[in-house]
Amino acid sequence: MWVIVGLGNPGRKYSATRHNIGFMVIDSLSERLSVVFTEKEKYLKGEGLYKDNRLVLIKPLTYMNLSGAAVREVLRMRNCPPERLIVVHDDLALPVGRIKIRERGSSGGHRGIQSIIESIGTNEFIRVKIGIGRSPEIPAEVYVLKKFTPQEREILNEAVESASDAVLSIIEKGVSRAMTEYNR
């Protein structure tokens, strides 16, 4: 079994913002795998199969900075080790649309990732990062809640599909091969 978490903020107000790219990837995966979500107290959950692997898709409803509470609950209820957790999230340090897979590491200043590390007690989980760029004029906490420009939307659509492919590649081929394929 694999738990795949897309980070974002709940509600229409945030749906198309840079910080919600993790939710967008989970939505893409749910469409591909015909997964239907049910609402729990702290998250939306959908279950499906991919190449004989059970997948649990999660969209936390706890807002970005408190994502760890939902992730901890799902891992505990499913008796899933952190090594079988894939978290998809935005990254300010990467150009718009660039994908990068990491096997473990620090939060890099991402508060959603920091919340997960603190809540589950380890940084030993896989991340699929998607670049959202950065603006030197706009503070990061404001920039991440902005929508993508029309020019960025096309790049974004490709990035969401590529990140979905990367998640499935991790499951099918392993994280090392997926990193070789996507960390270019």
Image (cartoon, helix red, strand yellow):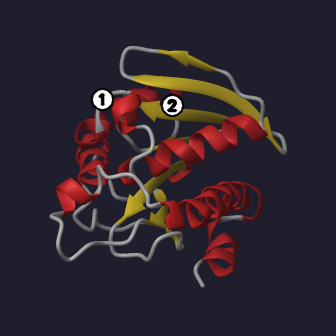
Q: At 44% from the left edge and 77% from the top edge, which residue is drawn? A: 95
Which residue was labeled with disc 2? 79
* Image-quadrant location for residue 138: bottom left
Rate crowding at label 1 as few (under 14), some (14 to 19) or many (20 or more) other CA atoms within 10 Å.
Answer: some
Q: Which residue is mark 1?
A: 62
Spatial CA distance of label 1 from label 2 is 21 Å
Quarter of the image for the C terminus: give it: bottom right
* Camera-side residue of 100 and 153: 153
Question: Would you place residue 98 above or below residue 124 in this image?
Answer: below
Percent position of residue 112, x then y: 29, 48
Task: For residue 53, say whether it is visible.
Answer: no
Q: Are marks 1 and 2 in contact (CB under 8 Å)?
A: no
* Closer to us: 129 or 50: 129
- Residue with the most extreme front position: 150
Q: Position of residue 63 (x, y in %)?
A: 29, 34
Q: Amino acid at mark 1?
A: Thr
Where is 69 relative to 174, above or below?
above
Instruction: Report the side of 70 relative to 82 (left or right).
Output: left
